[in-house]
Image (cartoon, rainbow, N blue to C red):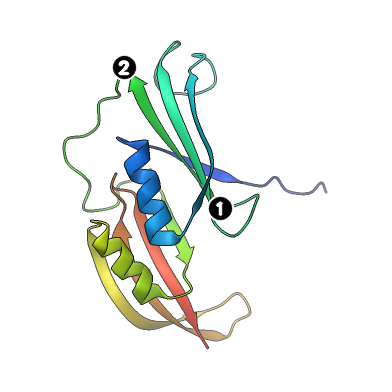
């Protein structure tokens, strides 16, 4: 059988790409690898229309190939956003799971950056892929556009 494909990036439609990028830099320590305007072709993306002007910022964490986040903003014309941010995860919405080096510190950075915290850091255990129990610290919160993050830290 052939090697499996790799999901390298998730692109999120956002209200303000710059504001979002600053949040990801401050909360998760991500770095920008691309920041570019582009015009939609009207063919590949199932959003907007041909000629729409957008801005795409791509950020990465520790890996150069996987786990990247793209922030896509419609600049002209602006894409209408829901008036209220979600407070619950809806069907079809992603849940991002982050392996934090310090869950409590990550949660505090999210709070300081204006995130709505859903679950404060708490101690818990999970059965890992190897069948052994693993102690964890976990929390969850929403980013500025209402995307949900579950943040976990392995405790030795």
- Describe residue 153's horizontal placement relative to residue 116 as left or right: right
Residue 95 visible somewhere in the drawing = yes
Residue 93 visible somewhere in the drawing = no
Mark 1 lies on residue: 67
Residue at horizontal 40 percent and vertical 67 percent from the top: 151
- Describe residue 49's horizontal placement relative to residue 107 as left or right: right
Which residue in the rendered view is the most extreme toward the top? 51
Quadrant for residue 103, please give it. bottom left
Which residue in the rendered view is the most extreme toward the bottom? 156
Compared with 51, 83 (above or below) is below
Residue at horizontal 29 percent and vertical 44 percent from the top: 145
- Residue 142 position, x and y percent, is 29, 55
Q: Marks 2 and 1: CB-CB under 8 Å? A: no
Compared with 112, 3 (above or below) is above
Give the Cα separation between the discs numbered 2 and 1: 29 Å
Compared with 32, 132 (above or below) is below
Residue at horizontal 31 percent and vertical 76 percent from the top: 121
Residue at horizontal 25 percent and vertical 26 percent from the top: 80
SS of the residue under disc 1: loop
The number of numbered discs placed on residues in the rendered structure image is 2
Mark 2 lies on residue: 77
- Residue 52 position, x and y percent, is 40, 15
Closer-to-camera residue (46/70): 70
- Residue 44 position, x and y percent, is 54, 21
The 10 Å Cα crowd at callout 2, few under 14, some 14 to 19, many 20 or more, is few
């Amino acid at each position: 059988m052939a090697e499996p494909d790799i999901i390298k990036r998730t692109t999120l439609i956002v209200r303000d790409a710059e504001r979002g990028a600053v949040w990801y830099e401050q909360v998760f320590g991500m770095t920008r690898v691309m920041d570019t305007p582009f015009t939609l072709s009207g063919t590949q993306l199932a959003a907007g229309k041909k000629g729409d002007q957008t801005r795409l910022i791509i950020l990465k964490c520790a890996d150069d190939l996987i786990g990247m986040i793209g922030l896509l903003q419609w600049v002209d014309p602006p894409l209408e956003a829901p008036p209220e941010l979600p407070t619950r995860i809806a069907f079809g919405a992603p849940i991002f799971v982050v392996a934090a080096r310090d869950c409590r510190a990550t949660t505090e950075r999210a709070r300081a950056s204006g995130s709505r915290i859903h679950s404060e850091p708490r101690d818990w255990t999970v059965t890992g892929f190897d069948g052994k129990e693993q102690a964890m610290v976990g929390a969850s919160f929403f980013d500025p556009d209402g995307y949900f993050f579950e943040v976990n830290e392995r405790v030795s």
